[in-house]
Image (cartoon, rainbow, N blue to C red):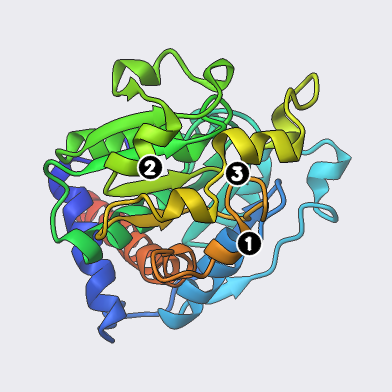
Amino acid sequence: MDDLTNEQMMYLIETAEAFRRGQKQLTRPYYAANLFFEDSTRTKSSFEMAERKLGMNVISFDAQTASIQKGETLYDTVKTLEAVGLDVVVIRHGEDRFFDQLEGRVKLSIINGGDGMGHHPSQCLLDLQTIYQEFKSFKGLNVTIVGDIHHSRVARSNAIALKRLGAFVQFSGPKEWMDDDLLAIGRYIDFDQAVETSDVLMMLRVQHERHAFGMTFSKNEYHRLYGLNAEREKRMKQSSIIMHPAPVNRGVEIADELVECSRSRIFKQMANGVYTRMAMLQFVLQQREALKHEFVN
């Protein structure tokens, strides 16, 4: 998200909306592969659906059976895919800023499908699209990101982008899970205050796998203190919405009965993810073609 201007972010949102209305623009078939070195349901399947809707040829890649298991570096893996003719790879990796080792060294296009605890640009953009559909603007919106802030690449990407687009960003949840860098972007507020004043409540998954020393809360205790339950939902503003990047720990971050309630946009986010990723793929491939044209000229 740091590499995109505000104008480019809005362009991607508008392009995603055009795809949602049925527009299709790619002029020739391209070849893509999805390199996922971390588990994923939504992001991986969403990218593959986006690629197929654009008429792209998707080359299968399984990290568990790839030569990386024999010691091959990420760079050599990507260079191999470049050599056999791929145009774009989507990579999810547990290492923060994995792309630094590839930038300037490969010619195919790279999309970050999530890097460690760094950033998650496609999730951020689909969240922006979902908010934009609801409110038609970001300026002046109160958006509170709640929960496991420190371990969340979703929180980081969204906080940066939302503030740049004019939203008022807040954080809530366990104070020991806050991130000092992000507190420079928005303030910390009490969760019950956030429930009553936010236009968007963006609940985050508790990332058990990233807690080195285990959870400091039981599931029931976390839900009591920081979970969105039916009583809290009744105190939300009439026009406010609930979001979550998923997978949802039902009964922990959100009560089971609220996951698909009228305020929830969780499954709409997933649907928007296909259109957003179509927009991202088209954007990077158009940039690639422009650079090739510039080089030829």
Work out whether residue 208 can be spotted.
yes
Q: Which corner quadrant of the image does residue 183 belong to?
A: top left
Question: Left or right of 222: which side holds 261?
Answer: left
Q: Nearer the viewer, residue 165 or 289?
A: 165
Q: CA distance from mark 3 to mark 1?
A: 14 Å
Tell whether label 3 touches label 2 (CB within 8 Å).
no
Type of amino acid under label 3: Arg
Residue occupied by mark 1:
256
Q: Residue at x 30, y 79 (%)?
A: 20
10 Å neighbourhood of mark 1: few (<14), some, or many (≥20)? some
Tell whether label 2 touches label 1 (CB within 8 Å).
no
**Figure check: 296 above or below 59:** above
Q: Which mark is residue 195?
A: 2
10 Å neighbourhood of mark 3: few (<14), some, or many (≥20)? many
Q: Of the residues under marks 2 and 3, which one precedes in the sequence?
A: 2
Q: Nearer the viewer, residue 247 or 217?
A: 217
Looking at the image, which residue sits at the far bottom? Answer: 22
Q: Position of residue 178 (x, y in %)?
A: 50, 20
Residue occupied by mark 3:
205
Q: CA distance from mark 1 to mark 2?
A: 17 Å
Q: Residue at x 74, y 22 (%)?
A: 216
Type of amino acid under label 1: Asp
Q: Position of residue 269 (x, y in %)?
A: 43, 64
* SS at circle 2: helix
Q: CA distance from mark 2 to mark 3?
A: 17 Å
- Locate the N terminus and report the quarter of the image it occupies: top left
